[in-house]
Each structure stands twice: as C-alpha cells, then as structure tokens.
Amino acid sequence: MKLKKWVIAGLLVQSVMANASDQLALHTVKKIYDMGKNLEKGNELIALYADQNLNRAIEVWNAAEYCIGYDVMWQSNDPPYHRKVTYTSLGNNQVKVSLAKVPYYDAASLTYKMSCVGNTCKIADIVDQFGSLKKNIAKECR
C-alpha cells in the first residue's frame, strides 16, 4: 500500500513539473513574438533564443550564399508584424503558433520545439509547412 502511494505521489510530481515546463515554453514563445512585434524582428530573435544545436545550424545559414530566403518566425519575405498571433501548448515543450490571415498574407502555423532546463527555455527547432528548420538548413544552405 505504501509503495502504491509513493508511485502515485511520484507521478503527480512528475505531471506538475511537466506542466510547469510546458507553461514556461509557452511563455517564452509569447515573449519572443511580443519582442518581434515591438522590434519588427523575426529570424534575429530565433537566433537569440536558439539552443546550441540550432545556433550551429543558424551559423551555417548566415554563412551560406544560398539558403532559406524568408522570415521563418513570421512566415514571410516581407513580414506583417501586426498579424494576430495565437498560441497553443501541445505538451512535451512544444508550442503551436498560428498567424492570422491579413491582406496579402495567408494564415500560417508553425510549431516551436523548445528545450527547457530550469527556468529557461530555448528554441530547439521550428517546424513549418516546409518541415524542420534544422533539417532544411542542412539540406538547403551551401
């Protein structure tokens, strides 16, 4: 009986910790988009909040002559920073971002895969209509 109580208590603590991590991931992505709107930035903020592995890929992207030619964060070559943004926590430190349709721009969505340690979350990867950002950089940038 005591073992059963300990197992249940352990599962409860694990669930609370996972939920806190998911909330931190959601908060971080919201913060990035708030900054993006205010500063009218996108890819620069992805680089600022990227984890070590994504940062290495971004270094390849920045050094490449031919590479990904759009703002991944805003899903556009000429970002409309005023778009309405909605956020959905998907669990496992993943956050879906939906960008509203505005004149000349279709609605778009992308998923942020976050790497959270302690009280800090970094972007591990972004998946949009073209797939994984890290994989696309490896494939497209030269």
Image (cartoon, helix red, strand yellow):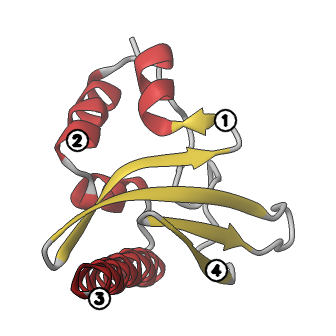
Mark sitting earlier along the chain (2/1): 2
* Three-letter code for the amino acid on which mark 3 is drawn: Lys
Mark sitting earlier along the chain (2/3): 3
Percent x, y for residue 25?
37, 74
Q: What residue sits 60% from the left and 67% below the top?
A: 96
Q: What residue sits 22% from the left and 41% below the top?
A: 55
Image height of 35 relative to 116, above or below: below
Distance of label 4 from label 3 (alpha carbons)? 43 Å
* Three-letter code for the amino acid on which mark 1 is drawn: Phe
Q: Name the residue under label 3.
A: 5
> Residue 41: which quarter of the image?
bottom left
Distance of label 2 from label 3 (alpha carbons)? 44 Å
Q: Name the residue under label 2.
A: 55
State whether residue 75 appears in this view.
yes
Badge 1 crowding class, 10 Å Cα cut-off, few under 14, some 14 to 19, many 20 or more, is few
Q: Name the residue under label 1.
A: 130
Percent x, y for residue 64?
34, 20
Mark sitting earlier along the chain (2/4): 2
Badge 4 crowding class, 10 Å Cα cut-off, few under 14, some 14 to 19, many 20 or more, is some
Q: What residue sits 51% from the left and 26% below the top?
A: 136
* Three-letter code for the amino acid on which mark 4 is drawn: Val
User: In the drawing, does residue 67 fall left or right of residue 115?
Assistant: right
Contact? badges 4 and 3 (CB < 8 Å): no
Q: What residue sits 21% from the left and 33% below the top?
A: 56
> Residue 39: which quarter of the image?
bottom left
* Three-letter code for the amino acid on which mark 2 is drawn: Asn
Labelled disc at residue 85: 4
